[in-house]
Structures are given as structure tokens and as C-alpha cells.
Image (cartoon, grey):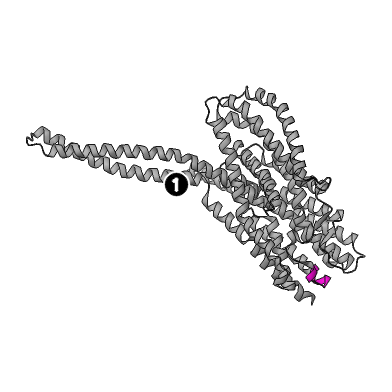
């Protein structure tokens, strides 16, 4: 009795400690997030106190900070989630790398001029009154941030670009009617809901299949890895060099695709020559198994996470600061423009906001992308990182609007479904055994039928016949049981490889992101208009 009480008390204490660990950090995170927003509020107020009609500039700065934190909490997970899920990086290591490179990407290559209306989704010329335009951009920022906050809370990685597009569209319609929307652009965005994950999934699955065929399915994995891993790293170097030149440093220098690809190829060749002996030396120390070969992908994955974060910071910071830059320009110049220069303080709000959001709230989505959809190791995570870079390159050259979130998560789906497909070999093997079993069963039927027709039935023979019939019935029952068990095992493996509930939740969130953000933005716009009127 005493033992039971002690055990119960220990369990109770452990539960209380768990609650404390979850509650106190959560409160601390919220406090730090609010502190960052307060700092942005105070700075924008003190630096723009003499600007006429500065109220919405200050409010916009706070909402921009809130949006940037939500981008950090949700979108950045796609860059580092696979590396964390494969255990190439620890959670803290991934967060620090992503926070630093996201901020660097925003500051160094974030661009000093952006389209304030993301993707040209509305025509700002149809809004004559600067105040109406400011209200619309404020509503768009807050709506997009609220939707991202909700998506993060339920563990759904959604597109921040689509969130702000939905916000701008909804506020634009509320301000000037449906004619303000570029419906052709909206059609392309809707198409990207399919294009992005399918392209990402196919490319990721293709790379993983190549790795399996060239390395995993061979008897001497180490020798195969010595030959093929340097090739993969060279391809990764080409892809990321081209990606960074095209997308990451376009503020510093803007080059066309062929030039960028040529420079990337030269860098890739150098990387191959330098890294081939290093990989061979490292491989000689490994065991000839999958776990050993996996370690060769750890360092490339760390570089991939850093480079993806840099490029993401350079591009997607505009989702937070584009509308804020539009508000700032409209307030200061009392006019509406399609393109504006981004002040340094606006860029800082976006860069630091993304880093703060990632540090405080990023782990939830990192776990979702890294481990809650399908099980990842370094090989699979490498394939996903390759898909993220190559898909963006292909899509940008074809003029297809794609989402980095959808590409990365689509890559995770592709890797998981490939595992299921390869497992079908085992299923076919089981089906072959069942066919043989049925053949044996027919032979047994024939034997028992022949025995029944025998004219001479001795007592001993009767005993054998009865026993054979009993065995036949037992085997038949067992066959049905085994068949059901095999079916259950197959379904269990499918659930293990790609968790269907996670897929359904994420896809549903993708589909409703634009309309949900649009409706919320329109509601907020009318609320602001009602208050200000």
C-alpha cells in the first residue's frame, strides 16, 4: 500500500512538473513577444512623432512586427524541419542557424524596393483616398498575421505569401470592389496549390530513389557512397549557388538564369574536386550499413538549412514589410504608389521579427515538418532540401507561382509516399506466398476427396481421414486470419510512412488560407472604417 502511494505521489509530482515546464515557458514566450512589439511601438512613436497622421504608421509597425514573428514561427520551419527530424541538427542548433541566416538574408539581400501589393494582386490606382489605402494595408497585415497565428497553433505549415495575398485581396475588395483584384494572378496562385507540392514531392522522391538505387540497395554501400555522394553534393552546390544568385543576392547583383547557372556549375565542379577525397576519407571510417552512410549527409544538410534560411529571409521578409512600407510611404507622402523604397527601420522590423518569432514559437512547426508527417533520416532530408532549391529554380524560369512552404512539405509527402511504394515489393512477395498456399490447399482438397472415395475403410484409416479433415478446416481458418493480419500490417505501415491525418489537416489549411485571410481582412477593414468614419 505504501509502495502504491509513493508511486502515485511520484507520478503526480511528475505531472505537475510537466505542466509547469509547459506553462512557464509559454508565459515567458508571450511576454517576450509582447516586449518586442512594445519596443517597435515605442521606436516608431518616438521617431515619427512629428509626422502628420502618424497613428496608422505606428499601428502598422506593430502589426508588421506581429506578422514577422508569425512568419518566423510558421514558415521558417520548412527550411530546418527536415534537418531536425533527421537529427542532423538539434532543435536549438537549427533555430540559431535559421535565426541568424534569416536575418542576414533580410538585411543583406532583402531588396530596397519591392512591390507593396504582393504579386500584383490588386491595382492600388483604384483607391484614390490614401486613408482608405492605409486602412486596407493595415487590415491585410493584421488578418494575415492572425491567420498564421491560428495555423501555427494547430500545427499546420501554411504559405505566408498566400496569407498576405489573401489579406490584401480581401481588404482591396472591401475598399474598392471586386474589379480591383487581378483575377488572372489569383488563378495562378490557386494553381500553385497543386503545382508546388507535386513538383516538390516528385523531385524529392526522385533524389531519394536515386540514393537508394545507387547506394542503399548495393552490397558495398561504402564504396558506392564514395562515388555517388560527391556527385550529390556537387549537384546540391550547383542548385544552391544558382538559387542564391537568382533569389538571394539580387539586391547586390542581378543576373539572368544562364549566367547564374554557369557560375553555379563552376562552383559545383570545384566543390566536387575538393570534397571527393574528403568524403572518401570519412567513408572509410564508417560501417557498411545505412546508418553509417547517413552520416555523410549531415554536413550538407547543415549548409542546406543555412542557405535556405538566407534565401527565405531575402525573399519572404517582403510579406511582413511590404504592406508596412506601403503604409509608411502613404502616410509620409500622402499618396499611393505601386512601388516604394523600404526604409531601414522597416527592414529591421521584418528581419528581427522573423528571428524573434522563430526563437520563441518555431519549434512547434519544426517538429510537424520534421517528424509528424513521416519519419526522416539524413538521406530523406537531403532529398527534400534538394527539392526545395531545384523546384524554385524550375518554377521561376517557367513563370509558375510556387510556395516555398508547399514545396518543402510536398517534398516530405513525396519521400513518405516513395517509402510506401517501395514497401509494395514486400506486399507482392506476400501475395505470391498466398498463391502458393492456395495451390497447396487445392492439392489437399483433392487428397481428401480421393480418400473419401476409398472402398475399404478401416478404423485406422477413418481416424486418419478425420484428422486430415480437421487439419483442412484449421488451415482454412488460419488462412483467413493471416490474410486479415497482413492487411492490418500493410495499413499500419502506410500510417507509419505518411500520417494521413497530418496530410488532411495540412492540405485543408492550404486550401482555405487565401479565402480565410481575405474574409478576415475584409471584416477588419470594415471595422476600422466604422471606427474612423
Residue 323 sits in quarter: bottom right
Task: Give the labeled residue for mark 1.
Answer: 491
Q: Main secondary structure of the magenta part?
A: helix
Total numbered labels: 1
Single out the residue that lies furthest toward the front.
258
Mark 1 surroundings: few (<14), some (14-19) or many (≥20) residues within 10 A: few
Towards the viewer: 158 or 447: 447
Q: Using the rendered image of the protein, determine whether residue 368 is visible from the camera's viewpoint.
A: no
Question: Residue 35, position in %: x, y?
Answer: 79, 55
Residue 527 left/right relative to 41:
left
Write the residue at 55% across / 24% down: 220
Specify whether residue 16 is painted magenta: no
Residue 164 sits in quarter: bottom right
Residue 354 left/right relative to 376:
right
Question: Residue 254, position in %: x, y?
Answer: 81, 46
Specify whether residue 127 is painted magenta: yes
Q: In this picture, is 160 found above or below 129?
A: above
Secondary element at tag 1? helix
Quarter of the image with the C terminus in it: bottom right
Question: Residue 204, position in %: x, y?
Answer: 60, 42
Instruction: Find the magenta span and give its range.
Output: 125-133
Q: In this picture, is 429 found above or below 394?
A: above
Write the residue at 29% across / 40% down: 438
Question: Residue 225, position in %: x, y?
Answer: 60, 28
Q: Using the rendered image of the protein, determine whether residue 326 is visible from the camera's viewpoint.
A: yes
Write the residue at 34% across / 39% down: 434
Residue 493 left/right relative to 102:
left
Write the residue at 73% across / 45% down: 309
Amino acid at each position: 500500500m505504501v509502495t502504491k502511494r509513493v508511486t502515485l505521489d511520484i507520478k503526480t509530482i511528475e505531472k505537475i512538473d510537466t505542466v509547469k515546464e509547459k506553462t512557464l515557458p509559454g508565459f515567458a514566450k508571450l511576454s517576450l513577444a509582447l516586449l518586442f512589439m512594445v519596443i517597435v511601438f515605442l521606436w516608431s512613436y518616438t521617431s515619427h512623432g512629428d509626422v502628420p497622421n502618424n497613428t496608422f504608421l505606428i499601428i502598422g509597425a506593430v502589426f508588421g512586427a506581429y506578422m514577422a514573428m508569425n512568419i518566423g514561427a510558421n514558415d521558417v520551419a520548412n527550411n530546418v524541419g527536415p534537418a531536425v527530424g533527421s537529427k542532423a541538427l538539434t532543435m536549438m542548433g537549427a533555430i540559431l542557424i535559421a535565426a541568424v541566416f534569416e536575418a542576414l538574408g533580410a538585411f543583406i539581400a532583402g531588396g530596397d524596393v519591392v512591390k507593396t501589393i504582393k504579386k500584383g494582386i490588386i491595382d492600388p490606382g483604384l483607391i484614390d483616398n490614401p486613408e482608405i489605402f492605409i486602412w486596407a494595408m493595415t487590415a491585410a497585415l493584421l488578418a494575415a498575421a492572425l491567420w498564421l497565428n491560428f495555423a501555427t497553433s494547430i500545427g499546420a505549415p501554411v504559405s505566408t505569401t498566400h496569407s498576405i495575398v489573401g489579406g490584401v485581396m480581401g481588404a482591396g475588395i472591401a475598399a474598392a470592389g471586386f474589379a480591383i483584384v487581378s483575377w488572372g494572378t489569383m488563378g495562378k496562385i490557386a494553381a500553385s496549390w497543386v503545382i508546388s507540392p507535386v513538383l516538390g514531392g516528385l523531385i524529392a522522391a526522385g533524389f531519394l530513389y536515386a540514393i537508394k538505387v545507387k547506394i542503399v540497395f548495393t552490397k558495398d554501400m561504402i564504396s558506392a557512397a564514395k562515388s555517388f555522394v560527391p556527385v550529390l553534393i556537387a549537384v546540391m552546390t550547383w542548385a544552391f549557388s544558382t538559387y542564391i544568385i537568382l533569389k538571394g543576392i539580387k539586391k547586390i547583383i542581378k543576373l539572368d538564369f544562364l549566367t547564374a547557372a554557369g557560375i553555379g556549375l563552376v562552383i559545383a565542379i570545384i566543390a566536387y574536386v575538393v570534397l571527393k577525397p574528403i568524403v572518401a576519407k570519412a567513408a572509410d571510417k564508417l560501417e557498411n550499413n545505412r546508418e553509417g552512410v547517413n552520416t555523410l549527409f549531415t554536413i550538407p544538410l547543415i549548409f542546406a538549412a543555412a542557405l535556405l534560411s538566407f534565401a527565405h529571409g531575402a525573399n519572404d521578409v517582403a510579406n511582413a514589410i511590404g504592406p508596412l512600407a506601403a503604409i509608411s510611404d502613404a502616410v509620409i507622402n500622402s499618396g499611393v504608389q505601386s512601388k516604394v523604397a523600404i526604409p531601414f527601420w522597416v527592414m529591421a522590423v521584418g528581419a528581427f521579427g522573423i528571428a524573434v518569432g522563430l526563437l520563441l514559437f518555431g519549434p512547434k512547426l519544426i517538429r510537424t515538418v520534421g517528424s509528424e508527417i513521416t519519419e526522416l533520416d539524413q538521406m530523406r532530408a537531403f532529398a527534400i532540401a534538394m527539392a526545395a532549391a531545384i523546384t524554385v529554380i524550375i518554377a521561376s524560369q517557367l513563370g509558375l507561382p510556387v510556395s516555398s512552404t508547399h514545396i518543402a512539405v510536398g517534398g516530405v509527402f513525396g519521400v513518405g509516399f516513395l517509402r510506401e511504394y517501395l514497401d509494395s515489393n514486400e506486399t507482392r512477395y506476400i501475395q505470391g506466398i498466398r498463391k502458393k498456399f492456395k495451390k497447396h490447399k487445392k492439392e489437399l482438397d483433392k487428397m481428401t476427396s480421393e480418400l473419401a472415395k476409398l472402398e475399404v475403410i478401416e478404423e485406422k484409416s477413418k481416424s486418419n481421414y478425420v484428422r486430415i479433415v480437421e487439419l483442412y478446416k484449421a488451415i482454412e481458418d488460419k488462412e483467413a486470419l493471416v490474410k486479415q493480419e497482413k492487411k492490418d500490417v500493410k495499413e499500419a505501415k502506410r500510417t507509419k510512412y505518411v500520417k494521413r491525418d497530418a496530410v488532411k489537416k495540412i492540405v485543408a489549411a492550404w486550401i482555405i488560407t487565401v479565402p480565410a485571410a481575405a474574409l478576415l481582412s475584409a471584416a477588419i477593414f470594415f471595422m476600422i472604417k466604422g471606427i474612423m468614419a
